[in-house]
């Protein structure tokens, strides 16, 4: 991918991506993936999840990334899932961001081509799982950048490849392809990496955090653009964001403290997120392909104890 881009081409690409139809800012939950008792993907619940997130007031949603068990899905499931989400989201307020990562460049380009036909608001991609070198990383994202003019988030996360792309490499990609100036940063030290990315605005268009939103208020004070976290408490995340944005920092802090009790609970009771997706009526089951979920009565009482504090703040 050694094509030399002329100034005219660069300006054309910049014009195509400078002003997305939707702002791509705020709380963008990573959608979970629902399954039947037999562990088949439940497309009905996937569409229901879109409706739930819309009721929560989120400005956008993302599927299928790590929280969505992307590595547990077949190609056919991912493609049909994207189609179901695009159909369910049509005419709704939230932006749709579709994950197009693949083990290698060819696979990712195939996902991108199929997703492009659904006309989402943006894409997101993890690095290639087969990538071994920084050159592999750059080639992969250059190919994706060349194949679309829609905003494409580069998600930097530890997926076992050991690759930790330097910030200057990410900036070089954004210079070559302005629509790659969108980042979700989860490689430690993530906040320092995000601060370094922020020094390159406006070339860097958006900086999103992850990590379940466990440092959300700090990230907002630092001026980052959003958070892609789990979605069992999407309405609570939205209320925290909106309170902070409107200058009600004490309210945001109080509600955030209640949310952190639930996020902390997830650390010592495996299966909390699956339980909550069913508990809130979003999914019919707690089934996951990553682990077997079996909660003791004591664990459920612990979850419910902390969830009680969030109940007055739920909207969906």
Image: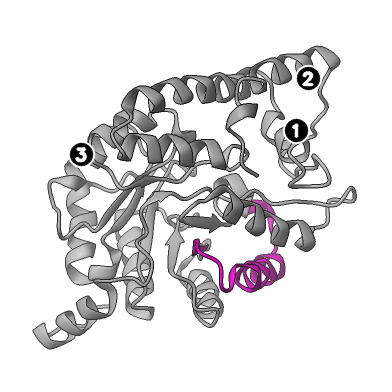
Task: Indicate the secondary structure of the residue bearing disc 3.
Answer: helix
Disc 2 target residue = 300
Asked if labels 1 and 3 touch by Cβ distance under 8 angstroms, the answer is: no
Nearest to the observer: residue 136 or residue 230: 230
Q: How far apart are marks 1 and 2 (CA)?
A: 9 Å
Q: Is residue 113 magenta?
A: no
Nearest to the observer: residue 289 or residue 276: 276
Q: Where is residue 241 in the image (x, y as percent from the top left)?
A: 40, 39
Task: Indicate the secondary structure of the residue bearing disc 2.
Answer: helix
Asked if labels 2 and 1 touch by Cβ distance under 8 angstroms, the answer is: yes
* Residue at image location 45% in from the left, 60% down from the top: 125
Q: Position of residue 295 (x, y in %)?
A: 81, 23
Q: Position of residue 297 (x, y in %)?
A: 85, 16
Region of the chain picked out in magenta, as a range = 71-98
Q: Residue lying at the far left in this picture: please name it.
A: 7
Q: Residues within 10 Å of mark 3 (few under 14, many from 20)?
A: some
Q: Is residue 87 magenta?
A: yes
């Amino acid at each position: 991918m050694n094509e030399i881009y002329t100034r005219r081409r660069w300006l054309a690409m910049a014009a195509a991506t400078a002003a997305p139809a939707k702002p791509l800012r705020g709380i963008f939950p990573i959608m979970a993936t629902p399954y039947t008792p037999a562990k088949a993907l439940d497309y009905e619940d996937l569409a229901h999840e879109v409706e739930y997130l819309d009721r929560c007031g989120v400005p956008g949603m993302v599927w299928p990334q790590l929280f969505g068990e992307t590595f547990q899905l077949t190609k056919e499931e991912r493609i049909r899932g994207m189609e179901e989400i695009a159909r369910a989201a049509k005419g709704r307020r939230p932006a749709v961001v579709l994950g197009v990562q693949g083990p290698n460049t060819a696979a990712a380009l195939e996902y991108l081509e199929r997703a492009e036909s659904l006309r989402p608001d943006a894409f997101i991609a993890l690095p290639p799982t087969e990538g071994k070198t920084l050159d592999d990383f750059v080639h992969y994202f250059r190919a994706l950048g060349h194949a679309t003019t829609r905003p494409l988030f580069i998600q930097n996360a530890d997926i076992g490849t050991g690759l930790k792309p330097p910030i200057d490499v990410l900036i070089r990609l954004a210079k070559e392809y302005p629509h790659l100036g969108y980042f979700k940063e989860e490689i430690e030290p993530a906040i320092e990496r995000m601060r370094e990315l922020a020094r390159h605005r406006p070339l860097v268009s958006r900086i999103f955090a992850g990590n379940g939103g466990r440092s959300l208020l700090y990230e907002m004070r630092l001026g980052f653009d959003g958070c892609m976290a789990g979605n069992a408490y999407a309405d609570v995340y939205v209320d925290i964001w909106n309170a902070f944005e409107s200058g009600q920092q004490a309210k945001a802090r109080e509600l955030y403290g209640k949310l952190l009790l639930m996020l902390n609970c997830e650390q010592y009771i495996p299966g909390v997120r699956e339980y909550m997706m069913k508990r809130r009526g979003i999914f019919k089951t707690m089934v996951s392909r990553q682990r077997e979920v079996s909660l003791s009565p004591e664990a459920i009482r612990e979850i419910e104890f902390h969830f009680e504090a969030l109940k007055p703040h739920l909207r969906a």
